[in-house]
Every structure is written in C-alpha cells, then in structure tokens.
Amino acid sequence: MWIFRFVGLRLLQAIPVLLGITLVAFLAIHLVPGDPVRIMLQGRASDAAVAEINARLGLDQPLLVQYGRFVGRAVTGDLGTSIIQRAPVSKIVTERLIPSSFLLAYATLLSVLLAVPLAVWAAARRDRFADHVIRIAGTVSFAMPSFWIGLILILGFGLTLKWFPIAGFGQGFWGHVRHLFLPALTIALFLAPLLIQSLRAAMLDAMTAEHVEVARAKGLGERRILFKYVLRAALIPVVTILAVNIGWMVSGSVIVESVFSVAGLGMLLVHAVSTRDYPVIQGLTLVFALMVIGVNLLADVACALIDRRTRNA
Amino acid sequence: MSAAVLSVGAWRAEVRRWSPSLWIGIALLAVIVLAGIFAPWLTPYDPLRQDYGAALRPPGPGHWFGTDSLGRDIFTRSLYAIRTDLVIGFWTTYVPMVVGVLLGAYAGLVRGWFDAVLMRVIDTALAFPFLVLIIVILAILGPGTQNIYIAVFLVGWTMYARLARAEMLVEGGKDYILAARTLGYPTSRILLRHALPNIIGSSIVFSMSDFVLNILLVSGLSFLGLGVPAPTPEWGAMVAEGKDFMQQAWWISTLPGLMIVVTGVALALLGDGLTHRLGDRHVTGG
Amino acid sequence: MSPAADAGALLRVEALEIAFRVRGGDVLATRGVSFEVRQGETLGLVGESGSGKSVLCRALLRLLPSPPAQIRGGRVLFDGVDLLALPEARMREIRGTDIAMVFQNPMTSLSPVWPIGDQVTEGLRIHRGLSKSAARDRGVELLRAIGIPDAARRYDDHPSQWSGGMLQRAVIAMAMACGPRLLLADEPTTALDVTIQEQILALLADLQAKNGMAMVLVSHDIGVVAETCDRIAVMYAGTLVETGPAAEVLGNPRHPYTLGLMRSSPRMDEHATRLQPIPGQPPDLARPAPGCPFVERCTFARDACRHESVRLREVAPGHASACLFPESVV
C-alpha cells in the first residue's frame, strides 16, 4: 500500500524536526537563569531539599546525559513530574488534551462551514458587491484580537441573550458542543477569512481552468462540474491552509481557553508559566509541537488522497 | 524605483496608481500614528493618573471612551497605547524581517551546508505554535517589554527567512543572476544589488499581515499578563482590565479592543494595496 | 460562399456576430461570419491568433461565458436546428454527443485529479447511461483505437503520468466517445512537438474517414490545414476573408491575407526561397474602421480599400474572397 510507504517516508523526514523540538523542550528548563528548582520552590526550601529535588530530576548530571534521558523517557511517554501539582506531567497533559482537541476540531469545522459557502459565493460574484463585502468583512475579522471577540461574544450571546454558557467544558458530548460554541466561533472568526481568501482564489483558478471548459464541451451539467471538477481541485488549498495555520489556531486556542476558562492545554500553559512549573512547560512544549507535526502529516495524507500527484513529493 | 522617487512627475504617476485600499490604509495609519505622536495635545488627562471619584464613568462628553475602574480616562490611555503597541509591533516586525530576509536569501544563493542547517532550524521553529514558543521563551526569560522583543525576534525571523529563501531559489535560476555570477561579481553584491530588489516584495507584503499579527500577539500576551507590565497603557492589557466589568462597564474592554481592530484593518488594507501595486511590476536588478 | 443551401450541409453558420463587453466599450470578436460544413467533410479555419477562430468554435457549442461574451446576431444551424435558440438543457445533450471538441493544450484539458480513463468515458456515462464496467470496456477500446498501448492497464493512470502527445490522444478519444457527427478541433497540434503533430493530424483524418464525421480544424498555420482539409475558410479580424475548396484557395489565392499566410508558413514553403512575415499588426477590434480591415498591412492596397465596405463575393464557383480587387492578388 502506498499509504504506509508515504507515511513512513514522512515520519523519516520529520526526524530532524523531532530532534529539534525535543532539544527546545529540553532547554526550556536549562536556559532558565539561576536555579529553576529554587525558582519553582520560591525560596521556601532548604538547600538539602533543593539538592534532593535536583538529584531526583537528574538535574545534577551532565547536560548531554540529561538530554539523552529526557528523549529516552519522552519516547516512552514519561514527561517527568510536576513539582507544583505533584503528579506526572503526562497525566496532567492527557487530561487537558481532550478539551483542547475538541475545541480545535470544533473550530475547524465551524470555519469550514463558514468559509466554503462564502468563498463559493464570492467566487461566483467575483468583483461584484457580495465579493467586496465578503472581502472587507474578512479583513476586519482577521484584525480582531481573539480575546476581544471572545469578550464581545460573552457579552452578547452569553450575558445579554443567555443563549450559550460563557465558561467551562460542560458535561457529555452535547454539553461540550454547547459550552465550546463561543470559543470555537472565536477561533473560526480568525481562521475563516484566511480560508475564504485562498478558497476563493483556488475556485477562480479552477473555474477558468481549461479542463473545466473541456468538461462543459462534453455536455456535463454545471452542478457536476462544480462538485467533481472545481471543488475537488479547490479542496487541496483548503487542506493546506488548515494545516499551515494549525499553529495559529493552537496559538489562538491558548488565548481563547483563558477567556472562556476552558481547562485545556492552553490554560495549563498560562497557569504553568505563572507558577513557574517548568516540567509542565517542558512537557507542553513537546506536546504542542507534536500536535502541529501530527496535523501536518494528516494534511499531507489528505492531499495525497485527493491528488495523486502529491504522493511522490 | 529610486528614479521614480526623484522626479515629481514620476511620483505623481506612482500615486495615481494607488488602489482605494492602499489610499484608505495609508490615510488611516497616518491618522493613528499622528494621534499617537500628538497624544498629549489631544487630551487633557494623564494616562496614568488615578481618580477614584471618576471611576467607571460611561462614554460621554467629558470622557469619550469612559473611564476604567481606577478612574483613568480610557480615550487618553488608548491614544498613549498607540505608542506602546505600534512601536513594539514595528520593531518586532522589521528587525526580524531584515535579518530573516538576509539569512534566507543568502542560504538560497549559496545553498550547501549553511542552507541545510538553516532550514532545519526554521523547520523546528515553525513546528511550534508561534504563541506557545513565545510564551515558553518568556517563561525562561521572565515577562516584560524587553523580553518580548527578544522572544519575538528569536522566532519571527524564521518566516521571513523561509519566504526569502524560496524566492531566492526561483530567482537564482534566472539569467541575470547567472550572468552576474559568470562575470565574477562577489556574492554580497549579487545578493544585495541584483537579487534583493526582486525578492523583497513578497516579504514586504507579508510584513503587513505580520505587523497585524505582532500587534495581536503583543496585546494577547499583555492580556494574559505576560506582556507589557501594569500601568503602561497597552490595548491588550486594557482589555484584560475590563474583562471582569463586562456587564456593568462594557466600554473598558471593547473600546481599546476597537483600536486594535482599526489599526489592524489599516495595516491589512495597506498590505492588500501593496500586493496589487507590487504585483503588476517586475523590479529589474539594479 | 454559395448562398444556395446544400442538401448535405450539417452545420450552417449565418451572419454570426459575437461581442465582448469590456471596460470602455465592446469588442467585436466576429462580424457577420457565415459558412457551412457538409456531412463528412473537413473545413480548415485559418488565421492569426486573435482573429476570432477560437471564439467562433466556442460560440458554436455555446461555451462562451456571458458576460462578457454576447451573441449579437446570426444563427447556428445544426441539422437544421438553431443551436442558439435551444434551451440550455437541450444544448447540453448535444455537446459531447452530436458535436464534440478538442482543445489546444492537452496538458490542461484533463483534470489533474481524476484517472484519465474515467474522464474519457464520462460522456458515455452521462449521455448514454452506461454502467461503470460497460463504460470501462468501451473506454479501453477507445484508448486502444487511438493508439495507446496497454490501454487496459493505463486506463487508471493520472494525466501527470502521460506525455503531451498521449494526452492529446486521450482528449481525442474523449471527444470521440459518443460518436459525434461534428468534431471541432481548436489548434489540436499547436502545443505539441512537430513530430507528434503529424501523428495527431493523421489520427484525426483516420478517425474522420472511419466514422464519416465532419470536422472543423482550426489552426494558425495554413500548412496544417492544407494537408487535411477539403475546404478552407480564412479568418481575419473577426471576418472571413476567403473561403473555398482547399485546392482552389491554396492554388489560386484571391485574398492578399491568404497569400501572406502561405508565404509565412514553413510547411508551404517548399518552393519559396525564404519565409516572408506579414508586416504590421491586426486592427484594434474595439475601434473598427471603415473599409477593408487588412488595408494597413496589404501590399496591394488602393484608395478604395480605405472607404468601401468589403464582403465575401464569389470569384469562382464555390470560391469567395472579400478583397475588392481579387484579380490583382498574385
């Protein structure tokens, strides 16, 4: 099967980057000026206690040995122990992974639902009124800070209209759907303009492509042409744009989780930074980067499924 | 391009080619910059002075944007914040741009080990969500304005380097670069005089949306409490200050946020106009 | 051209006028073009780029996007039915079944994301309601017939895996799928290597002979047309300037533009000592001037050519020219 070979090859190609991100994550503790353990304990511990924690975390070993151990343990899923929360980092992170993933998937879905009809509309009414309005709305939407939109949505839909809850993750699937609607919409309002822009351009390209004219000369109906030829060709830019912007989406989710008090990875990160919980910061650094790499791999596979030409690339 | 700047006639012709979005973008940005510069003359209030007697006043004739929970005039603080946000946004965009473009273009020209190492570094940096990497660096360095500069610089140059490298790879195969090489010109001359004018366009266009993103980033960091420290007027921090008063005093958060939107739209329009302006001209190497 | 309607006329175009609405006015792409194609014959349509040949072809199938294109007048009679008056749904049935088209660039004529075979047989499935497997069997036959080796295995290939010449064969197979009675070939060899061009022209001639279909072969190269066509129509600046049997037109050209095309074609050049380009540029179609459109570039031009309107007039039986002084063309 080509797909195994394809994924295998991509994973091999990712090795240098994986090494790079483990190095960055590793250095997250070691570049801290001063003694991270003392900073974490905020001077409340005796010298003996600090030395004991240093030995327990292996911070007294040579750097290279520590890095080797760090990578070795990370591969087995062991990301160390949080000194503040007194629990394994992997456990803390896994708990928070679900709300964050739910939020990101939800935001992606909402932005696609927003973007596809608007992009199709804008492309069909190219350079006319609707097209201009959609573009201007996109520009404004792109410039709105997500923490600000979040607060306005809270004020409007949460506090005033009381349609949606304004904080938390909720109970059960539909509870999550209700609770995360406003946070997901906030991210989607940032992402959708980017999607609309590239999808519109891709559709205009595809609509004027010669093979579309050939399809028309074959006597195909416009609906079949739109779905089988135009949208399919325009799908690749959409997947690529989603993949390229996963980093921005995650960035947005960090802020949005704080605004809506969603107990996800982003809130954990902000909390860990303010409590100087370095093992958690380190683990999160790794997890966030792996998320981005994973999504990009998925996008590559999706593109290869849509268009065979990208399989050998 | 340099010749075009010299003569008045050519300059007029240039201005005539500006699209409406370029015009509106430039005009809006000029108003914002001037408002920032002349803030002390535009408002009678002090951005830092607290006045508990005047706390939580709604927008009105005395206080156009209302006052916050400490009685500070929000319009005044929003104006002074232009200085904070635009200045940080500017430097965090253009210092990384210069460094990134030079590194990327050089790598694309010479290829070899330098290019390979640079690309691995860039791939690594871009594997992280931008904000996460910045937050991690700030966790290492500690919060504060100066550390924001360092953190954004450490990450920001990579995008420009990748862009410039990709452009350089295309441009490097063209005849005028080959010709310059055949003539034995030094690499620095080929890079700066021949290649750069042709590859800088896409970076300039990208820098406009990067500028927007950096303002969003700085205000976002301040919103999270990791950015510009407390009394300094900064839009994101001002939004954060108002978030607990949303129901009784909506103006504290909304109006400074609106300043971000207007600034962002101005820069985005400028970028949009520049894209069209630069898109229809091929700059010949000088 | 003889105005008498031949009993054998499959396609009759009458006074077709197409305009493009652009900023600052209308551009007339064709002005009162009339011609006919008989059952089983090949009409060669020649002219420089921009003379309106491709627009004309697309207009016959009603493929021009409107706006900006606009059909101002005339009729397109296929089998006696005016195509311009048909509802869109009926027109769609005619496309690909009665009239098919082959385009200039094979590399972009097929969607890059579908298997070639499925695209070749798509018309069969849409128009003839063939099942997937029946379409596949027929598709393999079609690919074999146009000279694709190992057609059954290559049916599932994607366009990126084939060369330009092979792709053009596939596009031709696609056009032939439903057995059209008229094939419009718009510069089918222009994007191909010279050696491949001959093969494609031979393939087209062969398919035409076997199926008894009529063909309109569009080319900017009068040499290409000379080899395969029964009759020739020369187009200049949106008008036909000379029509007639191929041997007549080429042996005894009666319009200076036809002569110029012959002298500038490498294929026609076997006896001439060197190629002679036609000087000057075609006129601006947005600002039509009175008189002959070719006047500025014509070596035979006289005063009258600037003022008097020109139209096709018979110079010999079946042979017409739009030149005011056809006898002076030598």
Image (cartoon, grey):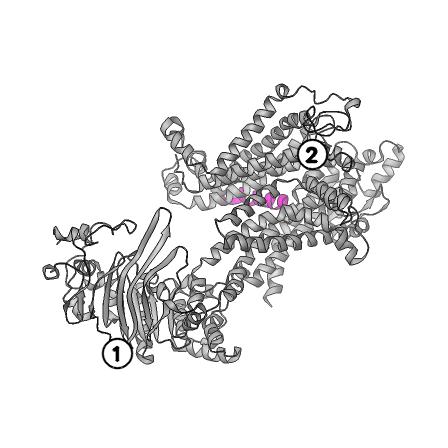
Q: Chain of mark 2?
A: B
What type of secondary structure mainly makes up the magenta span?
Answer: helix
- In the image, is residue B50 above or below residue A198? above
Query: As drawn, is A155 to the left or to the right of B196?
Result: right
Residue C268 image point, x, y percent: 20, 64
List the residue tagged with mark 2. B236
Q: Is residue B117 magenta?
A: yes
Q: Residue at x 58, y 29 (%)?
A: B32
Q: Which residues are magenta?
A: B111-126
Looking at the rendered structure, the kind of residue marked 1 is Ala
List the residue tagged with mark 1. C7
| Farthest-out residue, left | C328
- The residue closer to the viewer here, B71 or C252, is B71
Q: Residues within 10 Å of mark 2 (few under 14, many from 20)?
A: many
Residue C129 image point, x, y percent: 50, 78
Q: Is residue B62 magenta?
A: no
Looking at the rendered structure, the kind of residue marked 2 is Gly
Query: Do badges 2 and 1 share one subunit?
Result: no
**Circle 2 sits in a helix, a strand or a loop, which is it?**
helix
- Viewer-side label of 2, 1: 1
Residue B230 image point, x, y percent: 74, 28
Q: Residue at x 21, y 59 (%)?
A: C261
